[in-house]
Image (tube, rainbow, N blue to C red):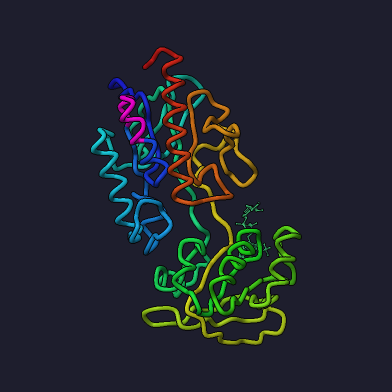
Amino acid sequence: MDALERITCLIIGSGPAGYTAAIYAARANLKPVLYQGIQPGGQLTITTEVENYPGYADGVQGPEMMVHFEKQAARMGADIRYGLATKVDFSSQPYKVQIDEEKWIEADSVIIATGASARWLGLESEQRLNGYGVSACAVCDGFFFRGKEVAIVGAGDTAAEEALYLSKLCTTVHMLIRRDAMRASKVMQKRVLQSPNIKIYWNTETDEVLGEKHVTAVRIRNNKTGEKQEIPVSGFFVAIGHEPNSAIFKGMIDMDEAGYIKTIPGTSKTNVEGVFAAGDVQDKIYRQAVTAAGSGCMAALDAERYLGAKGIH
Ligand code: NDP
């Protein structure tokens, strides 16, 4: 068998967390290798305009911003590669990571920045109009619907928070809830129910998002009475949860019951020495590009200290 490639600092994932980790690790001369994963650039590549990332005074398109991140990491000397981590073995050091179900590499430190994926309803129209009125992030896209009517699906804390956020921008928020109860915490439920321009539809499911080039309405159905209705809206927000992209790490690292990787508060350290996590794979609360980037920076600094203390770097 050929000798395995040995990497000092392996970064898995290419969203803001992964690229920021790569920028810092490269500048610290850790010679990072970053594998981009299945969706180079991450979730921002499926959004349109980003207006809340500091430094872009005029806003920037999500995909363009991720090209900037990549270029900056490459300019600092990070080795950026296509490829998906398909298996890991953290049982002994150096850690082993398999790429594209073929090649195994060895790493002295690993930064996990594999992100999360929004859950979708699975409607064809939802996919077709994604970015054209359909969004899974109110904080990212709500601004574009100022003074308009929107609908939001979901009844957890995220949906409640996003409905409240949208209610400050939009004339009416139609909140579509599939049961006769909300999953969100009591305090969030109360806020939603007391909000005069959030209209709740209980026992309601979405049959179709309507619109040719952009969203114009949503067709809903009451799952108790079967009654159908079309509501004219410009925006359709889906807030039915996220899935952290952590499946390959199961059994290797501590996670919560939803699969988010646990980090020691205030650090990027996981329970496995030398393995760090950054961005949405370990954050179910903030989920912003800027917070992901910040935690990517933390992971690179933690890795640098770890490698230094081990005498590897
Ligand atoms: P949750 O899993 O808590 O809620 C998902 C919601 O989407 C539920 O209301 C669920 O309905 C609904 N849903 C799921 N699938 C469908 C579907 N196909 N059609 C219609 N509705 C659907 O996800 P969240 O993202 O809201 O929250 C994730 C975690 O993060 C939670 O633990 C939450 O408390 C936490 N969080 C905390 C925040 C805070 O503290 N500030 C902010 C945001 C999240 P049903 O209830 O019927 O299953």
Which of these two is toward me, 25 or 251? 25
Q: Is residue 111 above or below residue 246?
A: above
Q: Quadrant of the C terminus?
A: top left
Q: Quarter of the picture for ligand 1?
A: bottom right
Query: Viewed as shown, does residue 70 lie left or right of 113?
Result: left
Could you say which quadrant of the image residue 255 lies in? top right
Which portion, as a residue range, is magenta? Answer: 22-32
Residue 90 on image: x %, y %:
49, 26
Q: Nearer the viewer, residue 181 or 23?
A: 23
Q: Is residue 293 above or below residue 138?
A: above
How many numbered callouts?
0
Q: Position of residue 249 (x, y in %)?
A: 51, 37
Determine whether 258 is above or below 30 in the image. below
Residue at point 46% right, 33% down? 299
Q: Is residue 303 magenta?
A: no
Check the picture and name the quadrant holding the N terminus.
Answer: top left
Q: Residue at x 34, y 49 (%)?
A: 40
Residue 22 image-quadrant placement: top left
Residue at 42% from the left image edge and 82% from the top image edge: 211
Seen as rendered, the residue at the extreme front is 57
- Where residue 64 appears, as percent x and y from the top left, is 29, 56
Position of residue 192 in the picture relative to residue 79 (left or right): right
Residue 72: x and y in percent read 27, 42
Residue 23 magenta-highlighted: yes
For image coordinates 56% across by 85% down, the residue present is: 231
Q: From the viewer's perspective, is 236 left or right of 255?
A: left
Residue positioned most to the top: 311
